[in-house]
Amino acid sequence: MPGTATTPQRVVGVVQHYAWGDTEFIPRLLGVEPDGEPWAELWLGTHANGPTTFADGTPLADVTGELPYLLKVLAAAEPLSLQAHPTGEQARAGFERGVFVDPHPKPELLVALTEFEALCGFRPPEWTIELLDRLGARELADAVRDRGSDDALQAIYHRRVDLAAIVAVIDQSADPLALWIGRLGERYGLDDPSVVAALLLNHVVLAPGEAIRLTAGNLHAYLRGAGIELMGASDNVVRGGLTVKPVDVELLLATVDTRPLRDPILPVVDGRYALPEAGVQLVWLDPGATYTATGHELAITLDGSQLYLAPGTELTTTADTFVVTPA
């Protein structure tokens, strides 16, 4: 029976062809000829929206039960929506009302495989004020200076500031974030408040191996690049904009955590990336490493193998490998 062997077993994840996906990274990883379609994400886990199977078609969940985590490869050629995820309490209440698809929160972390750009959490107000003053966006700078990031975000989404004027002013700047604001404005239009809301957030450029962790309420958007994601087993997303998908501004404003995030980069200890909210961690193993699983664990290698490790399974890696282990 699948799942009972003490050697690593191959499994088959589910590819999600979202429009923002890169056409080549995931096919090349899996050794498949690109077909010109966007391959945005590869899911490994037991979530109903993308359940993993063994090679013979047996559902992974038949062996493991419902796993508390979801492992993904993500490859973005275009920006994703500006979004946040609910707390556990918000998720449960929203699920009961039919607002959310899962009763669970969605903490997540992303480890960059290529250079990776993202917007991640609110900058300290003094940093935002300095940036906006430098860019000449004085109306928004005054909103942050006088009333803080939370009220400034409300002002943006309720259109109490002149969005088009702000974008027009910063469009003259060569600042990396200002350049992104210009691109987002061209793509989604100046009527999308999320274009301006991005000015309140940390602009992060990750080198391969660096990571960010997104706790509940973190307002974020992935801009470009490929990475490995580990998250709670949930598909709860609240979108504010930068998307053609439905948005819910009032729910977003009730969900986001505007407390400043001074250092969005996740500390890494011995190749381990912790996601304590889900009780798991992601371990990066070098080629030639040996490892013994202690739980129902999933792994993906950078030469394209997708693996299930039963408790006690021994693995000797032949390529860089990411394994999900209990924290």
Image (cartoon, grey):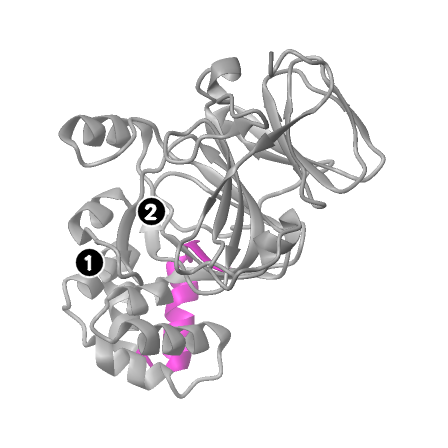
- State the image coordinates of residue 30 (x, y, percent, origin top left): 63, 47
Please tell me which residue is depicted at 14% across the width and 62% down the height of the picture: 158
Packing grade of label 2 (10 A; few <14, some 14-19, many >=20) is many
Query: Is 113 placed above or below 229 here?
Result: below
Badges 2 and 1: C-beta atoms under 8 Å apart?
Answer: no
Could you tell me the amino acid type at mark 1? Answer: Gln
- State the image coordinates of residue 247 (x, y, percent, origin top left): 21, 54
Q: Secondary structure at mark 2?
A: strand
How many callouts does the rendering have? 2
Residue linked to disc 2: 84
- State the image coordinates of residue 107 (x, y, percent, origin top left): 43, 36
Query: Is 2 placed above or below 133 here?
Result: above
In this rendered view, identify the residue nearer to me: 184 or 62: 62
Q: Quick check: is 187 in the magenta stretch?
A: no
Which badge, 2 or 1, is on the more N-terminal residue?
2
Q: Which residues are magenta?
A: 118-137
On the rendered structure, is 139 left or right of 75?
A: left
Mark carried by residue 154: 1
Query: Is 34 placed above or below 233 here?
Result: below
Could you tell me the amino acid type at mark 2? Answer: Ala
- Residue that lies at the very extreme toward the bottom in this rendered image: 172
Examine the rendering and report whether any part of residue 326 can be seen: no
